[in-house]
Every structure is written in C-alpha cells, then in structure tokens.
Image: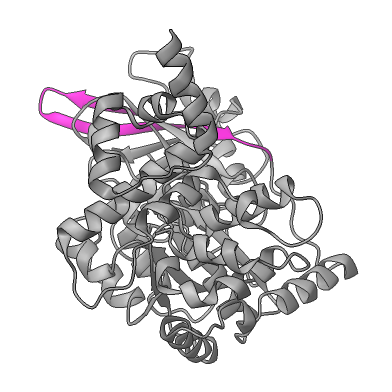
Amino acid sequence: MGFRPMPSSSQPPPNRGRPRGSSSFAWRSFFEQTTTPLFVLGKNRRLRYANAAWEKLTGLSREEAFGMVCSARKRSSPLPAALAPSPAALAGQVDTSRRPAAPHRNGPPWWDITFVPLRTIDGLFGIVGIITVVGDAVVAAAKKIPPQVVALREECTKYYNFDLLTGESMAAERLVAQARLAASLTAPVWLVGEPGSGKETTARVIHAHSPWRERAFVAIDCLGLQPYLIEGLLFGHGGLAPADRVGTIYLKEPSALPRDLQQRLADEFADRVQPRLICGSRSSAAHAVAAGTLVPMFQSVYSAFEIHVPPLREQLDDLPRIAARYLPHRPLDPAALAVLRMHPWPGQLREFRTVLREAAAAAPNGPILREHLPLALRLRAEAVRLPPSKTLSLDRILQAVERRLIEFALQKTQGNQTEAAELLGIFRTRLHRRLEALGITSPPNSSLRKHEQRKNDEG
C-alpha cells in the first residue's frame, strides 16, 4: 500500500506524506498526534502502518511489527490473532469485533476493533483498524502469596478429599478408584454426568490431590458466559492460560463454545501440562462430536481419560452418608430414609441438598422425621409402596396404588367420603363403588362418617 513503518522515538515525525495536490495537510502527523490506536492492513492482511498510540498499547515497536500477517489461523500468536480482520470486513463491510487483548505486561482485558474497508474499483485495497480499549488495567499479581490465601487453599484441600465420593455402592467405588487414578496423572480428564450429579466436586477432589494442588482451581461456565468473555479470561491480559499460578481449569459444557474457540483451546493446550484442563459435560465427547457440537481435535486432546459421575439414583445406599455431609449433626429417621430412597432425584445432589435443608428448617432440633419431608415426596412414597410379590401383575399393582390413595384421602378428610371424593377428583358414588370393590369396609374415623350419614338422612 506504500505505507512504511514510522520511527518509534518520542520525537514528532517529519511533516511528509501529504496527499497528492495537498500543501497543508500532513496525514502522518495527524495520525501520530491522536491517542486512538490506529493501524492499516494491506489487502493481504499484512500490517503496513500503525500510529504511536498503537505502539504504546501493544508494547511492540512498529519496525518489528511491519509486515506482520494479521490472521487468526492455527498457530498465530496472540497479537496477529487479535488484529485479524473479521469476515465481514474482508467482504467490504464496516464491522466491530470484540477481541481479547494480546498478552503483554499489564493492560486492559479486551479490545473493540472497528474495521473500515478501503475499496477501489478493483476491489478491496486495504483495511483501517481503530482500537477501543474496554475495561480497566489488570494489575500484575504480587509475587508473594498472602498467608490468608495459603490458609484458604489448605482448608479447601482438606475439605475436598476422597471421602466426598466414597460410598458403599458399586458406582461410588468405581468413581473413587477412577478419581484417584486421575489425580496421579497429568492427562486431561473428561467428566460425564447429569446436571447436578457432582462433576465439579469430583474435579475439585482430583485437583486437591494432584501435583498442582498448591495452585488455583478455576471453574468456567461455558453455558453462562459469552464466548468473548471466556476467550478474554483465558488468553487476554492477566489470562488464565499463561498463568503459572493456575493449576486446573474446569470447563463446564465446553461443547457450548463456538467451534473456532474450541479449536484454539485444542491448539493452545495440546502440548501443555499446566494448567491442566478438566471438562464436565452431560454427554461423552464422542457423542458431542457425532452431534456436531464439538470439534474432533478437542475430543482427541481432552477426552482420553473419561470418568462417569453416577446419578444419585444409583447411589441410594449412600444417602445416609451424603446426608451426613450436608447435615452432620442431624441423623435421618429410618422412615424418612425410606421415603428418600423411593424418590428418583431428577435434580441430583442439588435437589437432595435442598430437600434436607427444608426438612431441617421444619425440625429445628433432633433427627429428621418422615413428617418433616416435603409432602410431594411422602405422597410419591405412599403411591409406589407395594406389597411384596414374586411376579408383577398390572391389575394387582393398580389396585394396590388405588387402595393407598383412597385410604390416604379418607385419612386426610377424617372419614368424610364426600370430601375424600372431591380430593380424589371423582364422584361420591364412584368412591362408594370402589370402596366396596376393594373391600375397604371401615375407613378411619368411622364415627364421623356415620354422623355425617345421619345428618344427610335427617336433611
């Protein structure tokens, strides 16, 4: 494009480079005096010009940067990737893209880069880039770790031990064995489990017993954060990827990331040992690749060691131990434990923790009894509790469930058949027929029922 690198000294540049036919406007001096970082790319995306503000922002002299290809292709360094023109700009449209600031010393975390295409009758001639800094400067971390942080890390290490995963069920024994093996290795780990099953807890336990337990554990929710924020957290100023104080990065649902960011993660971390990446997902990496939500290279790099985190319904024998973790001084009554074991727990450990806290609030002191549990859980337990049988008979099962519901309705209404029928959503005559068919001849509180019948006869 005819642009040449400018001197990087603090002296104002010579008054030259005026447009043809102009005798007063020195465009180079004009661009050098502005505090807005500017740069110009040729049609081949090579850097042809940058002003002094750009040089100050990037920390790179223009002599060194001149001719640099600004592309986000594989293996590009952070600065060329940040300055790479967007597809819309290459198509001739003015476009603004948010990019993580290229890491150098200290500085702001993001750049908003506006790309202005320069066109001629022959097509794209070049692109002018204007950088707007977003966010405050990131202060360099102190070299010495405060004692409070060291104490907090030791406390977390003691809490996240293998006892959190230990249980009597086969699923818990398998999980503990795999977690111990993962803690002794340096390879990435892919955790598979339903939402709320404890994948992040498992990742923290693995980190707490790994060679990087003295370093930080960072969890990133790929579903809850914008992709540019995640890219900035990992690769921007003060980013986690090059940080020597981060031991483990836990990515929740990495298949929710854009494919180009997945590819960059695979490229950046493929040959690294630290920080270690642990991914948590509701499906296996192979399934995500087959569904088209995960790039194949991401699977090959991060899913070599896959661990299945079992749902709570596969650990019903461990409910007392898990309950003791959340309520250490509040034992479960056997009747309450029987109700909890009959629930399928679709919300996994999160739902179980919420139920226990509500029950503890209903009973401030003493053990957790059956009546302290939510009504929905007790009703379900009554409905699914069946008499022992060697064979499954549909009619027998339905009759047993119907009998339980009718008896429960009569108990709730103190033997009032009219109110019981309303509670069950049926007519009173139908309830009377079902009482006779099921052989329920003496509902609870029959004296009230007889008194009600006598009142109806008198009326």
Decide if residue 145 is on the left or right side of residue 156.
right
Q: Is residue 294 part of the magenta span, yes or no?
A: no
Specify start and end residues of the magenta stretch as a single range: 115-136
Tell me how many marks there are. 0
Q: Main secondary structure of the magenta part?
A: strand
Residue at the top extreme?
Answer: 459
Residue 146, percent across and down?
A: 87, 67
Residue 287, percent across and down?
A: 21, 66
**Residue depicted at 63% across the width and 33% down the height:** 12
Q: Report the quarter where the N terminus lies.
A: top left
**Residue depicted at 21% across the width and 60% down the height:** 396
Decide if residue 370 is on the left or right side of residue 415.
right
Q: Taking 177 as reference, is 288 above or below it? A: above
Residue 334, percent across and down?
A: 60, 69
Q: Taking 163 as reference, is 415 above or below it? A: above
Residue 160, percent across and down?
A: 66, 75
Residue 291 visible, this angle: no
